[in-house]
Amino acid sequence: MKEYLDLLRHILEHGNERHDRTGIGTKSVFGYQMRVDLEKGFPLLTTKKMHLKSIIHELLWFLSGDTNIRYLVQNGVRIWNEWPFEGYKKSGEYQGETMEEFVEKIKNDEGFAKKWGNLGPVYGKQWTAWQCMDGSTINQIQNVIDMIKKDPTSRRLIVSGWNVGDIQTLIKGKTSAPPLCHTMFQFYVNKNKLSCQLYQRSADVFLGVPFNIASYSLLTLMIAQATGLIPGEFVHTFGDVHIYNNHMDQVKEQLTRTPKPLPKMIINPNVKDIFKFKFEDFELKEYDSYPPIKAPIAV
């Protein structure tokens, strides 16, 4: 994807050196937008091999409303493991276990997972069970689908992840996950095409953003199918978009690679309910990529 490589170059050329909460430091710019035409192919990076299994399972996990990593662990998805492990290491119950041993306990011990695998009020909760003051909950995903069907030109086709009350719980360290990076996303219908714009307050460009592009593009394809529309554009708008200092060599390696044609995502056409999709309902075709590039995650 040329659009993604252009973002990497823009940060390298124009970014500001900044300190951050992880202590690693970043090169960062504030405010950037890229647009991806979903009719030209599924925007899964070809300049490094992407782990599509993790992307699909994470999205299904969000849509299920789950906030515990056990489902992810049981399906071989590791992308959220570091945060609960760091929380466990600070507890009085930590006995020197490695990350691998911690993950095995999450996978095989339901009680341990219930206590140490929960991330708090993250995406699944905010998307499907937003807590109201009267004690009721709102399924924002279902609401936005209903609104698309009834009033497709509405300017209120929005899902918010930034629940200020719950964010305070996260900020005060009462849970292991950081405040949500994907602040909100909005849908737009024009000429039978469904587009989605994500506003992301903070973005790890090398590790996180490629997953985010694919995830929200896939969500757009799923909601388009659930509403009888055609996928249009995915618009990715950033606040603080950055490259960690310990990812610079990996970024430069990726920039030496020429993008290949985008693959195609085939979705089971029989599934019309957004909450009924299963992993087996997705098939990626014609994916040709360069080898993966490993980099450490900043926690």
Image (cartoon, rainbow, N blue to C red):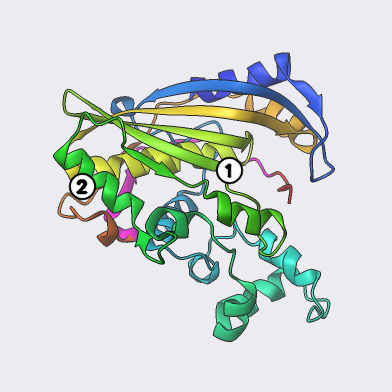
The residue wearing badge 1 is 181
- Looking at the rendered structure, the kind of residue marked 1 is Cys
| Apparent side of residue 213 relative to residue 221 in the rendered image (left or right) | right
Q: Which mark is residue 201?
A: none
Position of 117 relative to 171 (above/below): below
- Distance from the alpha carbon under mark 1 to that under mark 2: 26 Å
Quarter of the image where one finds residue 271: bottom left
Q: Position of residue 259 (x, y in %)?
A: 50, 24
The magenta-colored residue range is: 279-294
Residue drawn at 33 percent across, 56 percent down: 139
| Apparent side of residue 49 relative to residue 255 in the rendered image (left or right) | left
Quarter of the image where one finds residue 81: bottom right
The residue wearing badge 2 is 146
Task: Examine the structure image and report whether residue 128 is included in the region drawn in magenta.
Answer: no
Q: Position of residue 183 (x, y in %)?
A: 52, 41
Would you say residue 228 is visible in this rendering? no
Quarter of the image where one finds residue 113: bottom right
Q: Position of residue 97 (x, y in %)?
A: 78, 76
**Which is more toward the observer, 186 or 208?**
186
